[in-house]
Image (tube, coloured by chain):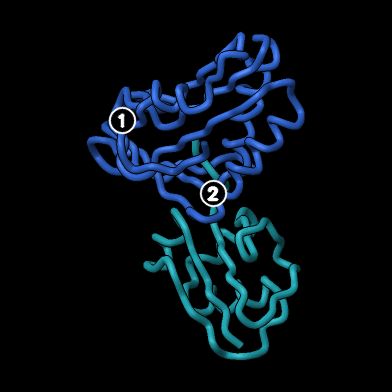
Amino acid sequence: MFRLVRQTIDIPSVTRSIQRPEDGAVVVFEGVVRNNSNGKGVLYLEYDAYEPMALKKIEEIGARAKKEFAIRDIAIVHRLGRVEIGECSTVIVVASAHRGAAFDACRFTIDTIKQIVPIWKKEFFEDGEVWVEGAH
Amino acid sequence: MNIRVLLFASLADLAGTREINLSSGGFTDVDSIFRELTADFPSLQARRSSVLVALNSEFATLDSPVKDGDEVAFFPPVSGG
């Protein structure tokens, strides 16, 4: 399951969508909106994306994770639009027979999302707003 | 020659638009399109060294060749997750 969504991510349903009886490990990563950035209070975030390319890149990352790690399946869901403090912006669920590969694939997936998926976050403060731009 | 240009995040804010359709001729590579954009939106020029490029939804570079009907996107380093 690879999706870009504009409403709250139902994490248990993402897990249910891929978990099978043969899985011995399910690793879930939640990226969560923090109330501060560089010491400044953040009110909320907004995510923008080049949607067709972002979805394509997320699918490619999922395929790479399945190829490079001994996992059985992976789901990736990313929020777009406004996301409140404490809400989940990104969910990765990895299902596999054993935990090691599931942890490794999950780490690889979030790190690679942050490097190559065309999604941008804008931080909203009391006194303004700023686009966050990754290091490249 | 028709090229669909997409801008995202801070680049869209600088230009005040997310989509521009270029229909003049003479575009050879992505850089020729970026130069056309900076003529219309000079504030984009400062982003030249950090801009990322996608050609038809795949990462490309300023020297990638373009053809009629291509979709070219310019955007800053990504910050999802």
Residue A40, by quadrant, is top left
Which of the two marks, 1 or 2, is nearer to us in this view? 2
Report the Cα–Cα distance between label 1 and label 2. Answer: 25 Å
Q: Residues within 10 Å of mark 2 (few under 14, many from 20)?
A: many
Q: Mark 2 — residue?
A: A54
Q: Mark 1 — residue?
A: A42
Residue drawn 74% across and 73% down?
B65
Q: Residues within 10 Å of mark 1 (few under 14, many from 20)?
A: many
Camera-side residue of A38 and B58: B58
Chain letter for the part of the structure drawn in blue: A
Q: Amino acid at mark 1?
A: Val
Give x and y (percent) for residue A28. 51, 18
Camera-side residue of B48 and B32: B32
Is A19 rendered above or below residue A120?
Answer: above
Q: On the rendered image, what quadrant is the N terminus of chain B found in?
A: bottom right
Chain letter for the part of the structure drawn in cyan: B
SS class, disc 1:
loop
Q: Amino acid at mark 2?
A: Ala
